[in-house]
Image (spheres, rainbow, N blue to C red):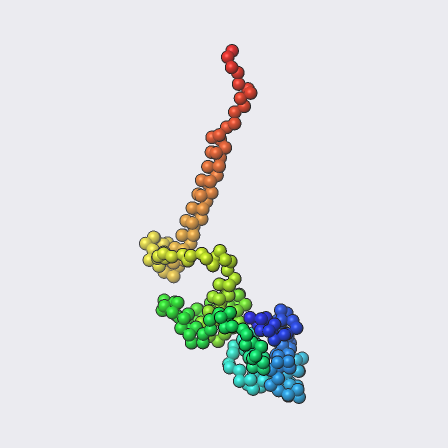
Amino acid sequence: MLKLKLEALGHPTPSDVALSDRKEFASTVLWVEDQKIRLYTVEDREKLRNIDNSAIWEEGYLKYCADLNMPPLESQQEQLAWILSHAVRLEFLDDPAQYASISSKQGPPQCNGKQGQQRVQSIFDGKINTQEKAFVDAVRLLASKLDVPHHPNHLLQLEAVARVVHHRLSPAAQGRKPVVGKPFPFDKGNDVVSSNDPALDLPMRILRLLQIQSLRELQTHINETIVAVQNITANPKTDTKLGKVGR
């Protein structure tokens, strides 16, 4: 997403921006301010130009974020995404006529954050607590693996993850019907477990089912091997030239 925003703004190397490098992050912020936002005069950007001096640059950057009225954000990726979005908005306001011919039907349906959050919550239908820390951490981890930008609202970030996954799936996978049926009651299994720790009962049941599945696959391979051997031995080839007629 950051790459697309940088491309839209005409950044010279949108694919090579590494947020893990402090100087590169600072250079990108300075480029956006110099070329697109222009909130400060050239003289007032002096602290942002002190990229090599982290203390001076950080002081100027914090003031810059405050002057932009940036909301409280957690990471540099989130902050840069907000700055780029602000720059894109300013680019549109500078010349909205050039976008007038673009039909809204060409893009995905738009909704505000509250609608998106309600839609995601309705999917889980109260079966999962979407506000607990484990769920939030899982969403953040999945988003980082798919390069989805950070968002303060993890439910909206989850919706973005779902869209990324949907668009990356192959046509065959997109048309595949979801698996339906009653899930196996792992927590209500009546098999005997050897653990004295109740917390280990569920993992042991899962491992036992995986072992059964592995044995079934092994048995299938054995059966296929037996059938292949029988097809060879049950159809011997006879050389009729060696046969004799009469005495």
Residue 172, position in %: x, y? 49, 56
Residue 173, position in %: x, y? 48, 57
Q: Is residue 204 visible?
A: no
In this view, the residue farthest toward the top is 247
Q: 175 and 71: which one is in front?
A: 175
Residue at coordinates 46% horizontally, 71% vertically from top-left?
A: 109
Residue 83, position in %: x, y? 56, 79
Q: 20 and 82: which one is in front?
A: 82
Residue 240, position in %: x, y? 53, 21
49 with respect to 113 (left or right): right
The tally of labels here is: 0
Q: 193 and 33: which one is in front?
A: 33
Residue 6 location, quadrant: bottom right
In the figure, 179 relative to 50: above or below? above
* Location of the N terminus (image quadrant): bottom right
In this view, the residue farthest toward the front is 101
Residue at coordinates 54% horizontally, 23% vertically from top-left?
A: 239
Residue 3 location, quadrant: bottom right
In the figure, 37 relative to 206: above or below? below
Residue 121 location, quadrant: bottom left
Q: 160 and 142: which one is in front?
A: 160
In the figure, 50 relative to 177: above or below? below
Residue at coordinates 47% horizontally, 59% vertically from top-left?
A: 174
Q: Is residue 236 visible?
A: yes
Residue at coordinates 64% horizontally, 88% vertically from top-left?
A: 41
